[in-house]
Image (cartoon, coloured by chain):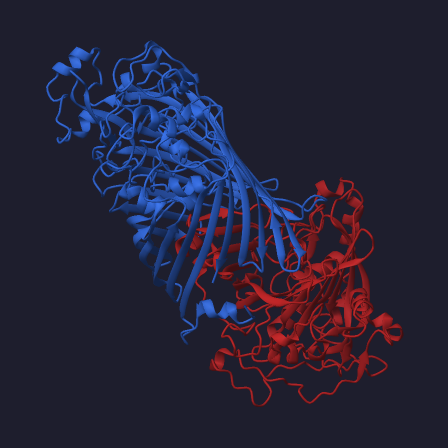
Chain colours: A red, B blue
């Protein structure tokens, strides 16, 4: 059943009916793996030839890749497209000509910083490649996932798959973006290089985040509703006063049934406590203030305050195959107001555009949110938060790149910008690769299960 | 400080399995007294040195603190941790200050207080407050191992454990007496939570995760230390006689009605065995609790706050007395806790029952006087009159004990963005306690239903019937703590602002258990903290506290003849109103590297 009797009799029965009609038709579903990629992207290129056909992506490392950790992969990476030359430079002068392919935030950056900000467009490389079983699951289980929960849209019947490769509405598209393919276990260095309103930059915060993604465990049929599909343990590394602090977050497919808990390990006390709600437009107190709790990874949390509308699939310029920026940029690229555009690689890709509009009667500092998802990977590429005066005040870039050693498309870094504060954070920015062992977004590490429970965190605490 | 600074702290030893962290926090603090000297305390010889040490606008603290921490972690499973604190205080000389008028009236030998023969600070005051010193805090090894599908983790050495869910209260929580509190740090850092004030002690502790939902914790202590209280004659002292909780170091006490220096020496405290505190706990978070966690606890421990008693060598012609602190032994605690998110609050709840816990005692009860009805009976009972060089048995010296019920509820919330602030947090906590039964020495239980009811004639003070307005315990008590910390980010390049406000208040009744709250007593602080690039912090903080007190006319015995002075015989709590005029403004600069 798509909707329970209870939800049908509520005022939201209409929405429920719409969602019920949202499943792809058998004809549409049959196109997956044919005219559509298994993730639902259009396999063919565009008429102009500026977007090529998807031919399977970059599934094996380029010549010359010799990771320090051998079969585990990781650094040092090599740029598979190092010989590509920019095709086009878009700046404040010629932006009007490309306005339909540029998001609001990027246009605003060009208007604000006409002398320094521009977009360098490179040939489009559809490098997204995932393990074969992902493709098989997507096709086999395409009719299984459903959106349930009247007030808080939740995900049912989905596991180890892109839930809605043929999305019919904004909620489905956002759920695709919430559960994009991730390795089962990974760890990342969430370093926050903050450039303040005077243009000076420094590291203000650094965490190592260990992540478990049971959602992508192909040996399991389905994660039960009451078990988390994603678990993240973060250990503070910097500033020194925060060292020893840990937080653990669980995320459920059914936010209509249970909230996503976050626990904190408090040094000194050596206790773990369930944190107060981290949600919506709350501002994380120690991250420079360039993002809200519901903006983690573009969008995070419950979808009950906004109406999510799928505006469709559009050709747009987005940062893609961000190898230069991720692999060889040093602190000098963190210019005042924005990252040096010379190290950003942009490509023309088809993106799914979702517009979220604040529901009448709901309170939030933003009136609107715009999300742009890469059609080949369902990874978010660009996000904007628009305030009640209609101005873009938060603008994020997720620097996507293909991790070819164990295929998967990931963001290597991301940038969260606050236009009203004129400050930004360059996240996971690790400087030139090799500076730190921590670089390597897909490096697996043996992680004990007990790390991801509040009790385990208590036992692990040192400070 | 550049981009590479964060890599410098996590020392790269070239092995990804090794985590080595070495961090150092340096802090400079200055503080100024913002209120005039209160004559009612300045003219009482048991309080003059604490009250007159600093005048209004004097620098009351001028201090450097360094905290350094080193952690070595191998594969997140084994390692060690050492932390040490160093400090240097420059606001005090090496001698205390006798109130000018007390000095004029009684002469230089008159003041009775906590110090050496020519007014030097005790070595305790010098060590922890007025001088330069340091100490090792944490020093322990840890390890964990998998046993089948379970995991056993243990720590051995000097460290703290803090159980339950309470945030501010140390007297009503499940963690009551689980570690000695550093009350010196508490008063000089208003708004600190209980966890910042725990002093590490030697113990073995372990967590056994039996399933992802159920774990067992336990500890056994090899060490016992009492609370660390501020010394008399220093700005935060509760009286001139306050001091070392071990007893012997400060030479003189201040409570006797005599003019001779050192007439009432502090004698060694009667302390429990060093080893033996232990506890076990179960923590359970089943799925149906929806991320909530319940806890069940049993602890048996020796208390860390002592009863103040008097040892009598002789009663006539003039009394020869010594003061002793006595610590309750083998208190048992059974507790339950629950925590979950309710609305947008992180809510913690605790309920605990304590068996044979220390109750509020008649100040300075005579050791051996328990259960006796007359002075004559006291003097005639063998063993009651003891040379000050002899140490009485614990049983003879024990204070009142009883069974109590305690409940704590708290909530923490992050502040949502509003027109007035951008971020921040708030915490509220209520602590309730109720007397269930008096198990030992009800005649020296300073309670309106016991010793206070008909008055009492033992101890340093002979008194008639009295009530809760002068600190007699009531059957129950309720106290609250509230903190509110709105925050503004990037108000200037890389600058964040916080406006911390904290209030602690005795809402109703005086706690029956020792070391609890008193109705109408409050403390507050308001500050402004500026953080630059998350590692430099400049803070200003104004703080004060208040306890109602009564006055009496000095008779030359306790203070200046004919002057209105603090009435110690009718004081509330241990410090009365001694800190009422000690509002102070603090300035702090802190950085970590």
Q: Is the N terminus of chain B in the top left, top right, bottom left or bottom right quadrant? A: bottom right
User: Percent position (x, y) of residue A236?
Assistant: 50, 60
Q: Is residue B210 left or right of residue B534?
A: left
Q: For this view, does B167 lie left or right of residue A218?
A: left
Q: Is residue B480 above or below residue B215?
A: above
- Residue plotted at (32% across, 15% down): B451
In the image, A139 versus A102, the foreground residue is: A102
Image coordinates for residue B152, horizontal then vertical, percent: 34, 55
Can residue B54 be seen? Answer: yes
Residue at the extreme left: B382
User: Total number of numbered labels?
Assistant: 0
Q: Is residue B219 above or below residue B25?
A: above
Q: Quadrant of residue A157?
A: bottom right
Position of A278 with respect to B219 (left or right) is right
- Residue A436, x across and y down, in percent: 51, 75
Q: In the drawing, does residue B332 fall left or right of residue A91?
A: left
Farthest-out residue, right: A97
Give the image location of residue B271, x and y in percent: 22, 36
Which residue is located at x 37 percent, y 36 percent? Answer: B176
Q: Residue A190 lies in what quarter of the image? A: bottom right
- Report the residue at 30% width, 18% height from top: B557
Q: Quadrant of residue B388?
A: top left
Nearest the eye: A354 or A36: A354
| In the image, residue B431 above or below residue A380 | above
Q: Is residue B474 visible?
A: no
Please name whichever residue, A247 or A228, is drawn nearer the observer in this view of the structure: A247
């Amino acid at each position: 059943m798509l909707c329970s009797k209870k939800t049908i009799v509520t005022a939201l029965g209409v929405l429920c009916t719409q969602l019920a009609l949202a499943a792809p038709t058998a004809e549409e579903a049959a196109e997956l793996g044919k005219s559509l990629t298994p993730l639902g992207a259009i396999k063919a290129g565009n008429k102009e030839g500026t977007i090529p056909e998807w031919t399977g992506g970059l599934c094996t490392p380029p010549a010359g890749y010799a990771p320090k950790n051998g079969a585990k992969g990781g650094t040092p990476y090599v740029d598979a497209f190092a010989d590509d030359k920019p095709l086009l430079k878009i700046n404040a002068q010629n932006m009007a000509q490309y306005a339909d392919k540029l998001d609001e935030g990027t246009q605003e950056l060009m208007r604000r910083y006409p002398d320094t900000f521009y977009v360098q467009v490179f040939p489009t490389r559809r490098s997204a490649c995932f393990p074969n079983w992902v493709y098989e699951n997507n096709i086999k289980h395409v009719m299984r996932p459903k959106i349930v929960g009247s007030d808080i849209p939740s995900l049912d019947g989905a596991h180890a798959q892109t839930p809605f490769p043929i999305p019919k509405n904004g909620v489905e598209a956002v759920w695709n973006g919430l559960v994009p393919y991730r390795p089962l276990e990974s760890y990342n260095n969430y370093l926050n290089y903050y450039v303040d309103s005077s243009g000076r930059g420094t590291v203000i915060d650094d965490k190592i985040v260990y992540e478990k993604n049971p959602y992508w465990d192909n040996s399991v049929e389905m994660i039960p509703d009451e078990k988390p599909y994603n678990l993240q343990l973060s250990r503070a590394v910097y500033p020194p006063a925060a060292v020893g602090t840990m937080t653990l977050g669980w995320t459920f497919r059914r936010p209509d049934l249970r909230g996503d808990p976050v626990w904190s390990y408090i040094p000194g006390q050596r206790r773990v406590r369930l944190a107060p709600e981290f949600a919506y437009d709350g501002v994380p107190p120690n991250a420079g203030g360039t993002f809200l709790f519901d903006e983690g990874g573009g969008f995070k949390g419950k979808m009950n305050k906004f109406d999510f509308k799928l505006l469709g699939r559009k050709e747009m310029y987005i940062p893609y195959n961000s190898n230069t920026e991720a692999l060889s940029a040093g602190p000098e690229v963190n210019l005042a107001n924005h990252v040096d555009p010379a190290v950003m690689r942009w490509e023309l890709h088809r993106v799914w555009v979702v517009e979220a509009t604040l529901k009448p009667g709901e309170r939030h500092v933003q009136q609107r949110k715009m999300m742009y998802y890469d059609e080949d990977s369902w990874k978010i590429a660009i996000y904007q938060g628009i305030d009640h005066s209609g101005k873009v005040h938060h603008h994020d870039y997720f620097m996507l790149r293909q991790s070819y050693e164990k295929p998967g498309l990931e963001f290597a870094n991301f940038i969260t910008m606050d236009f009203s504060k004129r400050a930004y954070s360059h996240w996971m920015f690790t400087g030139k690769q090799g500076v730190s062992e921590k670089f390597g977004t897909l490096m697996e590490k043996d992680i004990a299960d007990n790390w991801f429970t509040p009790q385990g965190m208590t036992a692990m605490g040192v400070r | 400080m550049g981009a590479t600074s964060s890599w410098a702290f996590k020392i790269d030893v070239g092995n990804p399995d090794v985590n080595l962290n070495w961090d150092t926090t340096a802090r400079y603090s200055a503080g100024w007294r913002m209120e005039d000297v209160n004559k009612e305390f300045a003219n009482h010889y048991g309080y003059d040195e604490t009250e007159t040490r600093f005048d209004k606008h004097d620098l009351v603290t001028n201090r450097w603190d360094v905290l350094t921490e080193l952690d070595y972690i191998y594969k997140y499973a084994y390692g060690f941790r050492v932390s040490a604190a160093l400090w240097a205080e420059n606001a005090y000389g090496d001698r205390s200050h006798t109130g000018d008028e007390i000095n004029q009236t009684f002469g230089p030998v008159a003041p009775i207080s906590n110090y050496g023969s020519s007014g030097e600070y005790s070595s305790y005051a010098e060590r922890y407050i007025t001088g330069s010193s340091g100490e090792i805090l944490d020093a322990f090894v840890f390890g964990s191992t998998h046993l089948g599908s379970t995991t056993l983790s243990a720590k051995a050495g000097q460290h703290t454990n803090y159980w339950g869910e309470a945030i501010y209260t140390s007297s009503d929580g499940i963690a009551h007496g689980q570690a000695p509190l550093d009350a010196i740090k508490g008063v000089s850092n208003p708004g600190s939570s209980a966890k910042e004030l725990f002093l590490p002690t030697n113990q073995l502790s372990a967590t056994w995760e039996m399933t992802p939902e159920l774990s067992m914790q336990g500890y056994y202590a090899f060490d016992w230390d009492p609370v660390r209280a501020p010394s008399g004659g220093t700005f935060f002292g509760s009286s001139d006689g306050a001091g070392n909780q071990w007893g012997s170091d400060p030479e003189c006490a201040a409570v006797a009605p005599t003019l001779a220096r050192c007439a009432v020496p502090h004698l060694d405290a009667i302390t429990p065995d060093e080893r033996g505190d232990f506890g076990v706990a179960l923590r359970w978070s089943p799925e149906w609790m929806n991320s909530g966690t319940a806890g069940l606890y049993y602890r048996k421990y020796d208390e860390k706050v002592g009863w103040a008693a008097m040892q009598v060598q002789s009663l006539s012609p003039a009394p020869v007395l010594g003061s002793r602190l006595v610590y309750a032994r083998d208190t048992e605690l059974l507790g339950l806790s629950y925590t979950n998110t309710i609305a947008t609050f992180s809510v913690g709840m605790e309920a605990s029952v304590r068996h044979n816990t220390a109750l509020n005692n008649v100040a300075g009860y005579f050791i051996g006087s328990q259960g006796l009805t007359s002075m004559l009976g006291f003097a005639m009972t063998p063993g009651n009159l003891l040379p000050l060089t002899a140490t009485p048995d614990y049983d003879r010296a024990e204070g009142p004990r009883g069974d109590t019920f305690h409940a704590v509820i708290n909530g923490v919330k992050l502040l949502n963005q509003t027109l007035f602030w951008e971020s921040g947090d708030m915490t509220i906590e209520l602590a309730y306690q109720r007397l269930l039964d008096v198990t030992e020495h009800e005649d020296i239980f300073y309670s309106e239903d016991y010793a206070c009811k008909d008055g009492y004639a033992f101890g340093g003070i002979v008194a008639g019937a009295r009530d809760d307005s002068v600190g007699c315990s009531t059957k129950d008590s309720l106290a609250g703590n509230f903190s509110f910390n709105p925050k503004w980010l990037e108000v200037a390049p890389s600058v964040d602002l916080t406006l911390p406000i904290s209030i602690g208040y005795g809402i109703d009744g005086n706690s029956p258990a020792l070391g609890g709250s008193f109705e109408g007593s409050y403390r507050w602080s308001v500050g402004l903290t500026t953080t630059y690039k998350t590692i430099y912090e400049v803070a200003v903080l104004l703080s004060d506290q208040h306890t109602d007190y009564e006055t009496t006319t000095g008779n030359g015995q306790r203070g200046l003849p004919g002057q209105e002075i603090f009435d110690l015989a009718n004081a509330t709590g241990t410090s009365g109103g001694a800190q009422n005029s000690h509002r102070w403004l603090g300035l702090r600069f802190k950085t970590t590297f």
